[in-house]
Image (cartoon, rainbow, N blue to C red):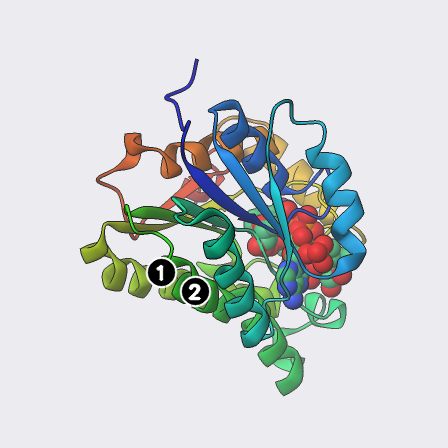
Amino acid sequence: MKFSLEGRTYVVMGVANKRSIAWGIARSLHEAGARLIFTYANERFEKPVKDLVSTLEGQDALFYECDVTNDEAVDATFQQIGEDVGTIHGLAHCIAFADKEDLKGEFVETSRDGFLLSQNISAFSLVAVTRAAEKLMTEGGSIVTMTYLGGERVVQNYNVMGVAKASLDASMKYLANDLGKRNIRVNAISAGPIRTLSAKGIGEFNSVLKQIEEKAPLRRTVTQEEVGDTAYYLMSDLSRGVTGETIHVDSGFNILG
Ligand code: NDP
Ligand code: N5H
């Protein structure tokens, strides 16, 4: 039995399908008794997300469309959430995007537009949603974002996303400093590679997984459930003294030289 999150409401952003890391987080929070709110990028994803959530027994979830590149959409979404539920206790930001062309070859070839696009969706969006969501965290709260090792060091092909994750990681720390006085914590989970829709079609992904199986201390890859349970810890009072932190859920791969 988990430490209960009954009576608490969490916003989960970035469920695309059942393989999404956001879905692992949603299931873990649901198991702890939390009420969930889901956002998706556009109405195309409304039905698939609703169908998925209908499999969570007894979950009285709410759904909103929210394209994070649009300030008005972000503000309107959180204003509506405020009107519908009042207080929220946390938010899981599981959103990233880069042009496929920028995820191969040499980083030096990155275009200005490609660079700004990935920064906009993958890093600035955390700032935008935090600013809108914190107004609803009247009892304190916990914000969790998803990052990857490629923001700390050079990982082949991650390129423009690595620079966006470095920006996200720094944003997470500045936000943690701003919001700490209102008892709102901001942390990141650095996940090892997981086969999701985003990872689909990325060249060399299989060899990245194989490298983890051969070299990571745990000699295996991680699952959405394992990331979900760490997000649950960060959302719960178990982590009440933790903010501005990055927890690696990566079978220990990051400690290797
Ligand atoms: P998914 O493809 O399942 O999720 C990516 C999500 O980003 C989608 O739900 C997509 O929404 C959303 N998104 C993209 N653009 C926008 C936008 N403009 N507005 C709102 N939402 C948007 O992949 P993952 O679960 O793998 O990715 C989740 C997070 O985890 C990302 O930050 C990723 O970088 C990170 N991560 C992933 C790892 C992995 O190996 N998979 C490893 C480490 C970190 P929609 O479907 O509605 O378009
Ligand atoms: C070193 C690697 C492998 C190479 C780099 C992969 C980077 C992936 C991240 C971004 C977010 C993927 C991405 O934007 C794909 C899009 O161009 C195309 N896909 C889509 O549009 C789908 C339909 C939608 C749902 O995707 C999004 N994002 O909206 C890194 C890997 C080992 C680990 C990894 C996969 C990290 C990560 O950040 O996801």
Direction from residue 220 to residue 177 in the image, left or right: left
Q: Which residue is more in the foreground, 72 or 52? A: 72
- How many neighbours does mark 2 have within 10 angstroms: few (below 14), some (14-19), or many (20 or more)? some
Question: What is the crowding at mark 1: few (fewer than 14 residues within 10 Å), some, or many (at least 20)?
Answer: some
The one nearer the camera, 7 or 145, is 7
Decide if ligand 1 comes within 8 Å of the CB at mark 2: no
Q: Which residue is mark 1?
A: 135
Residue for point 66% across, 45% down: 208
Q: Where is ligand 1, by quadrant?
A: bottom right
Given residues 99 and 21, the one toward you in this image is 21
State which quarter of the image contains the N terminus.
Answer: top left
Amino acid, disc 1: Lys
User: Which quarter of the figure has residue 51?
Assistant: top right
Q: Secondary structure at mark 2?
A: helix
Q: Amino acid at mark 2?
A: Ala
Contact (Cβ within 8 Å) of mark 2 with mark 1: yes
Residue 172 quadrant: bottom left
Residue sitting nearer the eye, 151 or 114:
114
Q: Secondary structure at mark 1?
A: loop
Q: Position of residue 129 (x, y in %)?
A: 47, 63
Tell me the number on the disc at residue 26.
Answer: none
Residue at image x 45%, y 44%? 254
Q: Residue most toward the left?
A: 181
Residue 132 got which mark? Answer: 2
Residue 44: percent from left, percent from top: 80, 57
Cα–Cα gap, marks 2 and 1: 6 Å
Q: In this picture, is 101 found above or below 150? A: below
- Find residue 135 and report its horizontal and vertical position in percent: 35, 60
